[in-house]
Image (cartoon, rainbow, N blue to C red):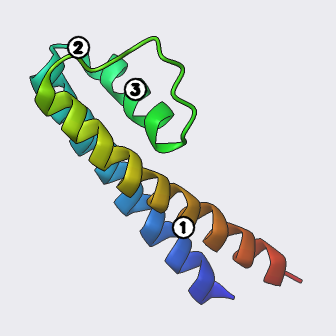
Amino acid sequence: MLHRLRVSVRILVVYLIFILVVAGIMVACEGWGFGDSVYFTISTCTTVGYGDFVPRSSTGKVVTSGASLVGSTLHFLFVTSLALWLDQRP
């Protein structure tokens, strides 16, 4: 049971680092503030995508495409591992 929790925490750490790295890239590419970039990255990774921030540069669009694929995978891996850990608790 503790092993599954450790796996969940590791996935969460990788996911958070990924969000921060992509947000930093978006600051450089799009000129947004860091908070706005984190918000955009999280909404993209969770597949919500409100549409209030839209990348305009070609680099930003490519980064967003990759971030949506990798980020949504990390997001669902974390949610699944957490659900498996919660399911095995006594």
- Mark 3, residue position: 40
Amino acid carrying label 2: it is: Trp
Q: Position of residue 26 (x, y in %)?
A: 20, 28
Give the residue displayed 23% in from the left and 14% down from the top: 32
Q: Quadrant of the C terminus?
A: bottom right
Tags 1 and 2 touching, CB below 8 Å: no
Question: What is the quadrant of residue 38 in the picture?
Answer: top left
- Give the spatial CA distance, label 1 vs label 2: 28 Å
Closer to the chain start, of discs 1 and 2, is 2
Res. 32 mark: 2
Amino acid carrying label 3: it is: Phe
Tags 3 and 2 touching, CB below 8 Å: yes
Closer to the chain start, of discs 3 and 1, is 3
**6 and 37: which one is in front?**
37
**59 and 12: which one is in front?**
59
Give the residue displayed 25% in from the left and 14% down from the top: 33
Question: What is the quadrant of residue 40 in the picture?
Answer: top left
Give the residue displayed 60% in from the left and 76% down from the top: 5
Q: Position of residue 28 (x, y in %)?
A: 10, 25
- Give the spatial CA distance, label 3 vs label 1: 20 Å
Res. 77 mark: 1
Question: What is the quadrant of residue 23 in the picture?
Answer: top left
